[in-house]
Image (spheres, grey):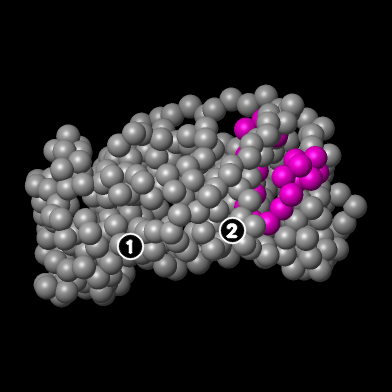
Amino acid sequence: MRQVTQTIHTHSLGNGLVLVAEPIPSLESAAFSFLIPAGCCSDPPDRHGLTAFTCEMALRGAGPRDNRAFVEALENLGVERHESVSVEHTVLAGASLASHLPDALTLYSDLLRAPHLPPVELEAGRMVVLQELRAIEDEPSQKVMMELRRRQFPDPWGRSSQGERDALEAITIDEIREQYRKLYRPNGTILGVAGRFDWPQLKDHVERVLGDWKTVAFQRPQESKAPQKHAHVAFESNQTQIGIAYESIPYRHPDYFRAWGSVGVLSGGMSSRLFTEVRERRGLCYSVYASLQTQRERAGVFCYAGTSERRAQETLDVTIAELSRLAEGIEAAELDRLKARIKSGLIMQQESSSARSSAVARDWYHLGHVRTLDELGRLVDELSCDSINSFLSEHPPRDFAVVTLGSSPLQVPA
């Protein structure tokens, strides 16, 4: 991987907001990513989906601009925007020509500090979040993985941000305004920026538009035990969806890249174990994959297989057997292919301001510092069969959570 000299700038505002920025002078763009500590983990028990609904409403006018004027202002700047809600955060991200970065951040400072949350827009916003929920309900593969996360992680960390239909239909504008008041705060917010910018000017501008944003006291939600690990969701279909999960280690753990490497051998290419054994050699399913999903304090490996009802039991048996076989270790050829894939991804990150703005914000949240691409490259180079196999001997895949969705339940192997 070609070496790139990287500088990481950081600045903490008096109100607790942290600005983390990586200049990439070779680019003509600049991107930003706000990580706001407003995740669906803070939804009240009878209002699952409230935080996602709040995010939707916050976009409908802010500061001196109504809904239409706010959208037009972003479009006039050529901002490509993205919003999402996870268990831990609301993410507000955008990218534009570098010269438009200050104006874009000014617009988003209005959104963060002074959204209108207009009652007249409530039903239009409700239709959007209900449509997003319906899209998942109509997609069995997503539905089974949502239920799997709920059974792998303790509540509220296994929740789906899309929420529940009854709750979304009952949410009022007053509840949305109260959720905004409680969750949208500078203390705990991280702003990641990457691309072409002048650091002193960027720092001064962020201080100017967000420096007097008022802090808000916050309490982390209490945990409750996850439900039973095995479940079947009845769904009339000729297909069966299978989800399997097991515990892993989070991004901040020193052995994370060993865990990541072991999952990369399982899934991630046409030579990966799951694709080769379950799909190609045996022809059991039309889709199979695994991914390591991490939160700050916990992580899990989540596997999916979609197959016919007739071959569902065999697919489940073979997939769990492949996951269990991983504990026997990986081979040098598998590791070589994995490293090649990872390094290709790192090189592409060097060419994307959006990818790097998201990465620097994420690193700061998980680690309290930012890993440069050179550091990531070294961590990948240091992976060996011995190091990954040692990790697997200490953390073998086991104690599986299994969720199936289809016409008939399956027998989970012992």
Q: Residues within 10 Å of mark 2 (few under 14, many from 20)?
A: many
Label 2: element kind: helix
Question: Where does label 2 land, which residue?
Answer: 354
In magenta stretch: residue 341: no
Front residue of this view, candidates 316 and 230 = 316
- Pointer 1 local density, CA inside 10 Å: few below 14, some 14–19, many at least 20: some
Q: Position of residue 377 (x, y in %)?
A: 38, 50
Is residue 72 among what the camera can see? yes
Amino acid type shown at disc 1: Arg
**Residue 266 visible within the image:** no
Q: Compare marks 1 and 2 and give the one earlier in the sequence.
A: 1
Vertical placement of residue 154 versus 305, above or below: above
Q: Is residue 301 above or below residue 15?
A: below
Q: Which mark is residue 134?
A: none
Q: Which residue is drawn at the image coordinates 86% and 49% (left, top)?
A: 63
Residue behind mark 1:
341
Is residue 192 located in the magenta-colored stretch of the structure? yes
* Measured Cα–Cα span from mark 1 to mark 2: 20 Å
Magenta range: 186-206
Q: Position of residue 218 (x, y in %)?
A: 63, 26
Residue 385 position in % (x across, y down): 17, 48
Between 330 and 27, the one nearer to me in the picture = 27
Q: Position of residue 362 (x, y in %)?
A: 52, 44
Q: Quadrant of the N terminus?
A: bottom left
Q: Is residue 227 left or right of residue 345?
A: left
The answer to whether 205 is drawn above or below residue 57 in the figure is above
